[in-house]
Image (cartoon, coloured by chain):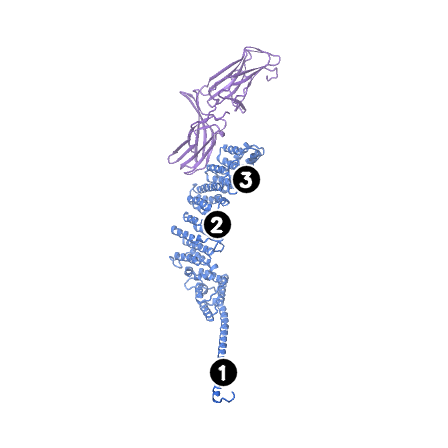
Chain colours: A purple, B blue
Amino acid sequence: MSIFGFSPSYTIDLELDEPPSGVYKDVAESPPSATQQGSIPKSNDSDLVRKIPVYTTTDKLSGTVKVNIPQGKKLDHLGLKVQLLGQTELFYDRGSTHTFLSLVKELDAPGTVYDSKGYQFSFDWEKPYETYRGLNVRVRYYVLVTLSRNYKGNLTAQKEVCVQHVSHDPEVNNSIKMEVGIEDCLHIEFEYEKQKYSLQDIIIGKIYFLLVRIKIKHMELAVIRRESAGGGQNVYNESTTLSKYEIMDGAPVRGECVPVRMFLKGVGGELTPTYRNVGGRFSLKYYLNLVLVDEEDRRYFKQQEITLWRKTLG
Amino acid sequence: STMNAAEEQVKYLSEATKKVKEHAFYMKRAIDANDLNTTLSLAADMLRELKTSLLTPRNYYELYMKVTDELRHVEDFFQALNKQGTPVVEMYEKVQHCANVVPRLYLLIAVGGVYIKSGEAPAKDILKDLIEMVKCVQYPTRGLFLRNYLSQTSRDKLPDTNSPYAGVGGDVTDAYDFVLQNFSEMNRLWVRLQHMGGGKDSRKKREKERQDLKILVGTNLVRLSQLEGIDSQIYKDVILPRILEQVEGCKDTIAQSYLMDCIIQVFPDEFHLATLQTFLNACTRLKEKVNIRDILQSMMNRLSNYSDGQADRIPKDLQAFNLFNDCITKILEERSNLSLPEILRLQTALMQFALKCYPGRMDYVNYCLGMCASVLSATQAGELDDSSVSEVEELLSIPLASLALKVLDLKQYAELLTYLPYENRRQVATTLVRSTLFAAGSVLDTPEKLEKLLAAITPLLKDEDAAGDAPPPTADDDPSVDEEFEEEQTLVARLVHTLRSDDTDVQFKLLSLARRHFGQGGVKRISHTLPPLVFSGLRLTHKVKAREVEAKRAEEDVRQKTEEKEKADALRKENEAKAAEDPDAPP
């Protein structure tokens, strides 16, 4: 709509049908406006929480494009198409975008549209990677509608969609049990029940103190995500501490055994499955970082990789 | 800082209290709005005040009370939500998302209580989980108060026998396992405070802090005593051994002293009688600095009160006296640091126990006196330190109330008296005379008895021969001393009335004996003690005179009768002779 209150303008709306999975995901993103001039806008963060549809495995993506024409007017155009795009965006260096999925459907040949009209479409599409929003890397899927015109610029509309893949319980899932220490200082044995955890799982384990000669103030368990992007000579590693969970207050003595119970649900919506070598471009690994802090704020830590997998969509 | 430590404490506490009030206010608003997430967030903020390390235990307790008061609203809220349809397990998980361990565990316990009440899971499972998770707080003060909150919250929800939570929820075994574990862990945390560094100066401060916190540990023992399902068999087989394991194992003097006494106070007499041997054995294994006498005395008093002077209340086969004696003997053998007064005090306590629980067993009393005599034999009479002197005085005074004169039959009694200096002997003597006068049926009827008594009360009768002891007061002396002296001598005087024998000769001997001893007392004494003797003597003379008169009359009677008989005999002889000469003459 024109902001000057003059004659209403031409708009296109993109509506997506409910995904076959029936699942939507909350994302904090501002919805792109319907009439954007110029190039494809990058999504940026805002305070709004939106729900985007989640697609998995062989789900089809279907929807409708609506072309809105004001009363008594007509619209000359050079073609109406809808694209389903999948891209990995790299933000380091000068940044680059690699399109790994590009499907297009012609909705209307060049011509004239006299009345508002709706065009239905459907895509059968490969979903090689999960949607991911990281620090140096993003994997995006989105639907882009373009109405081409020779003057006044193209009309576009786009919507983000989310791709997720569900796995099954791993057949083999051994516990992690390790003794670690600093000679004459601190010696612990920690145990985590499993190596592989679903995103709603609970980290259950225990910490056994074999030798305590330092004055421990507290102990915490952090979840760290390490994103490795690029390859060859340019590898960019970015570690983020997603959460810190205090598991012990005060100083134990030798022989003490302290339980660990941390809900991955509490880590928040930033958890994704472990990604190994996505599209040859990046990996995403998760670590549990056990940290002991002493009275002088010295930190003693032990990092341990865990594998996260997705059990349910959402 | 320009403030001293006490002022700083006031400041910290008032700041923390203010924050608690603030968070609680908004928290209650969230509760009214039925908003669980906001409630939990604000509750966590409020509970974070309990993370402080700045407060002394007493002040931390104040803060803890305020916070747990406010937590009651949260507990009620959880309960209301559950009634409205929220499964408790959901809330139980949600509170565990809290990233700080202290707030998280308080909330977990709060939900845990509601969980047990709801019956949505067996009580024993919830209790097991809670007791495991609270291990995450290892800082002594914070850990102790957290576990106290656990103890308070769970107290009415244990699967005790006859409790609504027993059955699927468990049984008394689960209940006492839970309490015993909390007790052990709390004791360990409490002992850990002792070693929290700071050097020699802070040791006194830490010990005081420990004393302030001891009730938190003791409450667990009270909780055990309140479990209906524990009988004396379970107490003997499980409970006491587990408690003693912790008491002995912690190797801490303050803990051992407090807990052994706690055990005595908290559990019923029947339990103590069933486990006396075990308890006493444990006493011999306590740390060097623990005052075992206090503990033994405490137990002996407990059992004395229970037996209440009746010899049959303590089971005969228990041989309690022997058990205590064996324990004391072992302690004397193994401990080198027991002072003489302490040893005497121990024997006195044992003797008191015997007097109360085994009235009539003079052999027990004699045994105790004998032990004291042998312990003292190494010391010269007159070389005894003041503490020991007062102990011996106590030892000799205590039996007088129940035994009175019978003490004179105890071999060692007189010997022990010799260890006392004049003043103390005088005190004992006064008590002896008093108890003799008040004891029913006290009668001095043989010279031997009187001799013994008079020997024992010599300090009342005369001045000390050796140098340095007090003579009877003169007219210029302190009037209160005068009063004391008067009282003493009056008592001695009244003794005269107990000198009684039906045999006047013996009576005379008694009075003479008394006269002989009283006479050595000096002018001031005689003025009190001779008058009753004189009156007794006069009474005696009446008696004797009466006897003599009676004897004379009897003699007279006999003489008269003999005379008459002789006259009658003579007359008969005359008549018989006359009849022989003149048969016809009239008689």
Query: Do circles 3 and 2 both sit on a common chain?
Result: yes
- Residue A200, relative to residue B238: is it above or below? above
Task: Give the residue number, with chain letter if any, for mark 3.
Answer: B69
- Residue B39, relative to residue B228: is it above or below? above
Instruction: Please tell me how many numbered marks the rendered image carries.
Output: 3
Decide: marks 3, 2 in contact (CB < 8 A)?
no
- Nearer the observer, B216 or B162: B162
Which amino acid does the dot numbered 2 rest on? Glu
Query: Do circles 1 and 3 both sit on a common chain?
Result: yes
Q: Position of residue A20 (x, y in %)?
A: 52, 21
Q: Chain of mark 3?
A: B
Task: Give the residue number, with chain letter if any, for mark 2.
Answer: B270
Q: Which mark is nearer the camera, 3 or 2? A: 2
Q: Position of residue B301 (x, y in %)?
A: 47, 52
Q: Secondary structure at mark 3?
A: helix
Q: Chain of mark 1?
A: B
- Nearer the observer, B87 or A7: B87
Specify which label sits upstream in the sequence, 1 or 3.
Answer: 3
Q: Residues within 10 Å of mark 3 (few under 14, many from 20)?
A: few
Specify which label sits upstream in the sequence, 2 or 1.
Answer: 2
Q: CA distance from mark 3 to mark 2?
A: 38 Å
Q: Left of A3 or right of it: where is B141?
A: left
Q: Residues within 10 Å of mark 1 (few under 14, many from 20)?
A: few
To which quarter of the image does residue B372 belong?
bottom left
Q: Is residue B7 visible?
A: no
Task: Give the residue number, with chain letter if any, for mark 1.
Answer: B568
Q: Position of residue A137 (x, y in %)?
A: 46, 22
Which amino acid does the dot numbered 1 rest on? Ala
